[in-house]
Image (cartoon, helix red, strand yellow):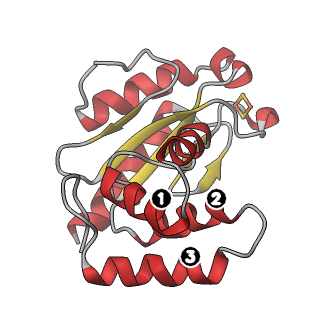
Amino acid sequence: MPTTDGLRPDAGERAFIDQVIARRSARPGALLGILEEVQEHQPRKYLCLDTIRYVAEKTGTSLSQIFSVVTFYALFNREPQGDHTIAICRGTACHTRGSRSLLESLRLELGLDEDGAHADKLTLTTPNGRFTIRTVACFGQCALAPVVEVDHRICGHMNEGVLKREVQALAGKESQ
Ligand code: FES
């Protein structure tokens, strides 16, 4: 079961975290791998405070150290993620090729509030939990600008029409 802030992870989740820690703790950079695997196991792909506390307790790591890892690496989420994630690059190459317009049209398509939509770093999830929009600093694929990642699939030379069709295709799959 998912965990929520204010509650300890349930017994099944604790058992999973315990075995991840036992399997990974001797490896270099263990904490990163532990957090990544724990997040991936969570249905909404995020690390809530209670899970972070539990990992800290079981690994003997300070909370501040875990938070510094979770906030430094873009792959970690502190909020529940949608069923589908669309990440828009806001790096310079993508910006000059229209990534702001892509972000704006996507936000309108999904009916997401404008709050923070102009920020360079944002994560917005639709109220029904189907879609999350994220921005990233650079995918390292600048020659393909503007770049959008749709459910971990890199799509280069994106335009508003193609992006709209991608979203509609995913929404269609959901309703089948
Ligand atoms: S700036 Fe967008 S991929 Fe590098």
Query: SS for tag 3?
Result: helix
Quadrant housing the N terminus: bottom left
Query: SS for tag 1?
Result: helix
122 relative to 111 in the view: left or right: right
Amino acid residing under circle 2: Leu
Q: Residue 139 in the image: x percent, y percent?
A: 70, 40
Mark 1 vs mark 3: which is more N-terminal? Answer: 3
Q: Are marks 1 and 3 in contact (CB under 8 Å)?
A: no
Q: Which mark is residue 85?
A: none
Q: CA distance from mark 2 to mark 1?
A: 12 Å
Q: Residue 175 in the image: x percent, y percent?
A: 21, 65
Position of 126 relative to 169 (above/below): above
Q: Which mark is residue 21?
A: 3
Which residue is at the front of the view, 41 or 142? 41
Q: Residue 127 in the image: x percent, y percent?
A: 18, 44
Mark 2 vs mark 1: which is more N-terminal? Answer: 2
Label 2 Cα neighbours within 10 Å, binned few <14 / some 14-19 / many ≥20: some
- Image quadrant of ligand 1 equals top right
Q: At 53% across and 45% down in the image, what residue appears?
A: 70
Amino acid residing under circle 1: Ala
Q: At 43% across and 72% down in the image, what residue appears?
A: 41
Query: SS for tag 2?
Result: helix
Q: CA distance from mark 1 to mark 3?
A: 11 Å
Amino acid residing under circle 3: Ile
Q: CA distance from mark 2 to mark 3?
A: 11 Å
Which residue corresponds to mark 2?
32
Q: Can the viewer see residue 46?
A: no
10 relative to 165 in the view: left or right: left
Q: Which mark is residue 56?
A: 1
Position of 159 relative to 85 (above/below): above
